Amino acid sequence: MKKENIKSFGLQAFFVVLLAVSLFVSPAVALFAGILFALLLGNPFPAHSKKASKLLLQWCVVGLGFGMNFHESLAAGRDGMIFTVVSVVMVMVVGVLVARLLRVDRKSGYLIASGTAICGGSAIAAVAPVIDADENQTSLSLATIFILNAVALFVFPVVGRWLEMGQVQFGTWAAIAIHDTSSVVGAGAAYGEEALKVATTVKLTRALWIIPLSLVSALIFRQKGKKVQIPWFILWFIAAMLLNTYCTLPEQLTHGISVAARSGLSATLFLIGGGLSVDVIRKVGLKPLVLGVVLWAVISFVSLAVILML
């Protein structure tokens, strides 16, 4: 066996071992390990990691539904639904205006605003074909959101504890101000049980805005015949909550599914972290990253101020 093949096999084996270990560590540690591995050694399975992380995240979100009561989750997330309507519109408007000021191309700016307003990569993936964005515009927007997501997962729990935020307060804030569902759930899990429930419920309610945003986007960019990608896993998450609430399921079963989902979430974040690379960071550039940071700051500080005042 050639030296290069041995080295490649060793790298792949090490990646698989760390992926298995990530099932038993916190989401933040798993994400950090994935990022560190990708930047220092390079991800040996970039395409597989991307596909696996997307599917695993959806399964884990549905699994979390078996650990939640529908009525309690709805009550906890009611205020977040109001914030969602206001913040989605606000971020989209501010995003379009700031993109023009920074001279970020129209479609890239719109995608970054969509990812910030709703649910990160999922929103970008849904809106991109609707507005006929090319591969470079899509990947640029995803990379911008991805970098900010990685930062958010570490920063938000620290800020929440520093401000002595309650579980419901933090869960609502994380769901509104953090982009991707994976980082929202990860931050909620790092903060506490109740924060996880609120964050997941509010974020998935927010993600449903992908559908009307895609329809409006088709009208704005006048792209005919483009299908809207419906996030079906959100409906399965709701179905899991309803089953857990209204059906008499064995407690050992629902608890086991919930625990497995949380472990899977850590593995998901390891895979997501493994998708970061020096090339991705370089590709983002300064202007799109500035746009992403500005929108992130707006939604973070405004939502935090409102939540703390209530």
Image (cartoon, helix red, strand yellow):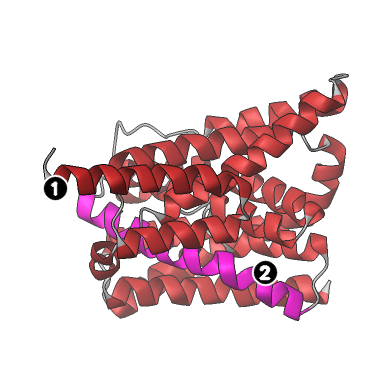
Q: At x 52% / y 54%, what residue is drawn? A: 180
Q: Quadrant of residue 260?
A: top right
User: Which amino acid is tagged 1?
Assistant: Lys
Q: At x 53% / y 40%, what residue is drawn? A: 57
Q: Which residue is identified by label 2?
A: 157
Give residue 3's mark.
1
Task: Tell me the distance, in whole angstroms, between the alpha carbons under discs 1 and 2.
Answer: 44 Å
Question: For this rendering, which residue is in front, 107 or 35?
Answer: 35
Badge 2: how crowded within 10 Å, few (<14), some, or many (20+)?
A: many
Q: Which part of the image, by quadrant, shows the N terminus?
A: top left
Q: Secondary structure at mark 2?
A: helix
- Residue 248 lies left or right of residue 93; in this view the side is right
Q: At x 51% / y 36%, what residue is drawn? A: 56
Q: Which residues are magenta?
A: 135-163
The image shows residue 292 at horizontal and vertical percentages of 42, 70
Is 60 drawn above or below residue 179 in the view shown? above
Is 142 drawn above or below residue 157 in the view shown? above
* Residue 256 in view in this figure: yes
Q: Which part of the image, by quadrant, shows the C terminus?
A: bottom right
Question: For this rendering, which residue is in front, 117 or 51?
Answer: 51
User: Which amino acid is tagged 2?
Assistant: Pro
Q: Quadrant of residue 5?
A: top left
